[in-house]
Image (cartoon, rainbow, N blue to C red):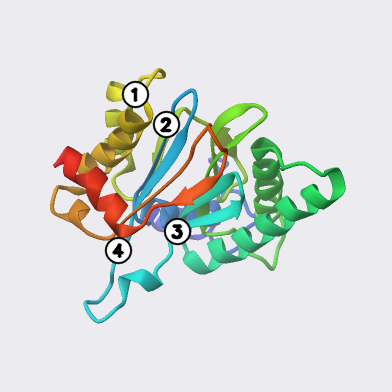
C-alpha cells in the first residue's frame, strides 16, 4: 500500500517511519474510508443521520445489517469500517452513557461521551500487542449544548461538525455539503440535504434501496429510527 520503503515500518504499531507516520493507524483509517457512506446534517433545532447499507449477496437479508445504532435516548451513531470493532465500541459507549445517568441523574453530554471513546481508541495506538480499532463512530445528538455532530477516528482524534460524511465517496459528499449547507434549514430541508448528499455520492440507482435514516428532533430530544416506508417517502421528494 505504501511501497517497499514503508514496509519495514509497518510490522509494529509503535514504530514510527522516518516521516513520522504510524502505518498501522493509517491502515485502520483506510478501513474507515472503504466503509459504506454515512452523512450527518444538523440545523439549529434538529439533527439527522443517513447511511447506506451494502448487501454483499442477494441471499443476504438486508434487515439483518445494522449501520445506525441508538446509544442513549438522545444519542445515535453510525459506523464505518469494521463492524465487529464498532459493535464492541458501541456497547462500551452505551455502558458509559448509562453510568453517567446513574451517577449524575442526567443525560450524558455528547462531547464527553465522544472524548471517552476517543481516549480508548488512542490507547490502542500506543501499546505493543494490540492493534488500532478499525472503525469510525459518527455521533448525533441533542444535549444542553444544542444539536451536535461528532466523529471519532481510529487514531483517537474527535471533531465536531455542522455537517459531515464518512466512508466511500466521502470527498464528493463533503464538497456537496459545503456547497449546499445552510444553518437555518427546516427539518425537511435538513433531511433532504442528507439524502441528496448520499444520492450525489453513491448514485441514483444505489440510493433506491437499503438506506437507513435516523434523527433527533429538538421538540422531544429523542433518537428516532425511520422505518422503510418513512425512508421511501423522503426519497420520493428528491428523486
Residue 59's place in the image compared with 81, above or below, is below
The spot of residue 234 in percent (x, y) is: 26, 44
Residue extending farthest to the bottom is 59
The spot of residue 82 in percent (x, y) is: 47, 64
In the displayed structure image, the side of residue 159 where residue 144 appears, left or right? right
Classify 10 Å Cα crowding around label 2: few (below 14), some (14-19), many (20 and above): many
Nearest the eye: 177 or 213: 213
Q: For the residue labelled by badge 1, is the local secondary structure a helix, a strand or a loop?
A: loop
Residue linked to disc 3? 81
The residue at the point 55 percent across, 55 percent down is 70
Measured in 3D between alpha carbons, the distance from the residue under mark 4 to the one under mark 2, in whole angstroms, is: 22 Å
Nearest the eye: 118 or 177: 177
Q: Is residue 10 visible?
A: yes
The dot on residue 54 is 4
Residue linked to disc 2? 163
User: Which tag, 2 or 1, sits closer to the chain's start?
Assistant: 2
Amino acid at each position: 500500500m505504501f511501497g517497499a520503503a514503508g514496509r519495514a515500518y509497518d510490522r509494529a504499531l509503535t514504530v514510527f517511519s522516518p516521516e513520522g507516520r504510524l502505518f498501522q493507524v493509517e491502515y485502520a483509517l483506510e478501513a474507515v474510508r472503504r466503509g459504506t457512506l454515512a452523512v450527518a446534517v444538523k440545523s439549529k433545532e434538529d439533527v439527522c443521520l443517513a447511511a447506506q447499507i451494502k448487501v454483499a449477496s442477494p441471499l443476504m437479508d438486508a434487515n439483518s445489517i445494522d449501520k445506525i445504532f441508538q446509544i442513549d435516548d438522545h444519542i445515535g451513531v453510525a459506523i464505518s469500517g469494521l463492524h465487529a470493532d464498532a459493535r464492541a465500541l458501541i456497547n462500551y459507549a452505551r455502558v458509559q452513557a448509562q453510568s453517567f445517568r446513574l451517577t449524575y441523574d442526567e443525560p450524558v453530554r455528547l462531547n464527553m461521551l465522544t472524548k471517552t471513546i476517543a481516549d480508548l481508541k488512542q490507547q490502542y495506538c500506543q501499546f505493543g500487542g494490540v492493534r488500532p480499532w478499525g472503525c469510525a463512530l459518527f455521533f448525533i445528538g441533542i444535549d444542553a449544548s444544542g444539536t451536535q455532530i461528532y466523529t471519532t477516528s481510529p487514531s483517537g482524534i474527535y471533531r465536531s461538525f455542522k455537517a459531515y460524511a464518512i466512508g466511500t465517496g466521502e470527498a464528493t459528499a463533503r464538497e456537496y455539503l459545503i456547497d449546499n449547507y445552510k444553518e437555518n434549514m427546516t427539518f425537511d430541508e435538513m433531511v433532504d440535504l442528507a439524502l441528496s448528499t448520499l444520492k450525489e455520492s453513491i448514485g441514483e440507482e444505489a440510493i433506491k434501496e437499503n438506506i437507513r435514516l435516523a434523527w433527533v428532533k429538538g421538540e422531544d430530544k429523542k433518537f428516532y429510527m425511520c422505518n422503510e416506508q418513512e425512508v421511501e417517502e423522503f426519497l420520493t421528494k428528491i428523486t
